Image: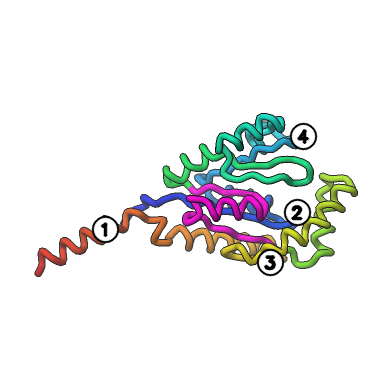
Amino acid sequence: MSDNRRGLLIILSSPSGAGKSTLAARLRQWDRDLAFSVSATTRQKREGETDGVDYHFMNEKTFKEQVARDEMLEHAHVFGNFYGSPRGPVEAAIEAGRDVLFDIDWQGAQQITNSALGQHTLSIFLLPPSIRELRARLEKRNLDSTEVIGRRMEKSWDEISHWGGYDYVLVNDNLDQTEARLKTIVEATRLRRIQQPWLNEHVRKLQSEFEDMA
């Protein structure tokens, strides 16, 4: 047997406040070799954020130039700002057998799933237990103004309406249980035949041994 496998593109999506950022952080703690796709964005940096760690912050002109050069694996316009996933680091990671984690919305997920790398994608959508709880979580984290929270809530149903386009859908009503289910899904998907190119050679060797015994 071999550990020589191809990396996965693991996509987590949800409406704002449903827990994808928290669960993404927990997955990275669980598997320290899991690469995280640091998104590029044109929005302003928030207090405590670090360029290149939380996001690649850039102006709109630079962002659009990179899109034009096909340097973004996916991109979208959300709440007046552009977001995207730089292509180069992702392709390098999966070729080296490292999984890459994406914390992106349904538009980005759809673009990646429909790309040439789609066959190596695992997409998971997180649903909140209720809309009331979703709003409570947004208010509790105290990151956005009342106006922005209102816009996020208006957009939440548009996000939720795309749940059917994902491989797995989990209701995040218990963070620890959802984390455990995520780990199970990731571990199982890593064993898919397409993620293990070494199996072709292994089967050829078995065939050769079988023919030698004939």
Among numbered discs 3 and 2, the one appearing first in the sequence: 2
Q: Quadrant of residue 211?
A: bottom left
**In the rendered structure, does residue 48 fall within the stretch colored magenta?**
no
- In which quadrant is the N terminus drawn? bottom left
What quarter of the picture does the C terminus occupy? bottom left
Which residue type carries mark 1? His
User: Left or right: 76 with respect to 192?
Assistant: right
Gap between marks 4 and 3 measured at Cα: 31 Å
Mark 3 to mark 2 CA distance (whole Å): 14 Å
| Residue furthest to the bottom | 214
Residue linked to disc 1: 202
N-terminal of the two: label 1 or label 4? 4
Real-space Cα separation, disc 1 to disc 4, in angstroms: 51 Å
Residue 16, numbered label: 2
Image position, residue 9 (x, y; %): 52, 51
Image position of 183 (left or right of 41): left
Q: Amino acid at mark 3?
A: Val
Q: Residues within 10 Å of mark 4 (few under 14, many from 20)?
A: few
> From the viewer's perspective, is 172 left or right of 207?
right
Mark 1: which secondary structure?
helix
Question: What secondary structure is found at the residue carrying circle 4?
Answer: loop
- Closer to us: 117 or 178: 117
Whether residue 116 is in magenta: the answer is yes
Q: Earlier in the sequence, mark 4 or mark 3?
A: 4
The image quadrant of residue 173 is bottom right
Can you name the residue that lies furthest to the front here?
A: 68
| Dot 2 and dot 1 residues touching (CB under 8 Å) | no
Task: Look at mark 4 in the image and give the residue it sits on.
Answer: 44
Rate crowding at label 3 as few (under 14), some (14 to 19) or many (20 or more) other CA atoms within 10 Å: some
> Is label 4 in contact with label 3 (beta carbons under 8 Å)?
no
Is residue 170 positioned above or below 94 on the image?
A: below
Marks 3 and 1, Cα distance to the nearest angstrom?
39 Å
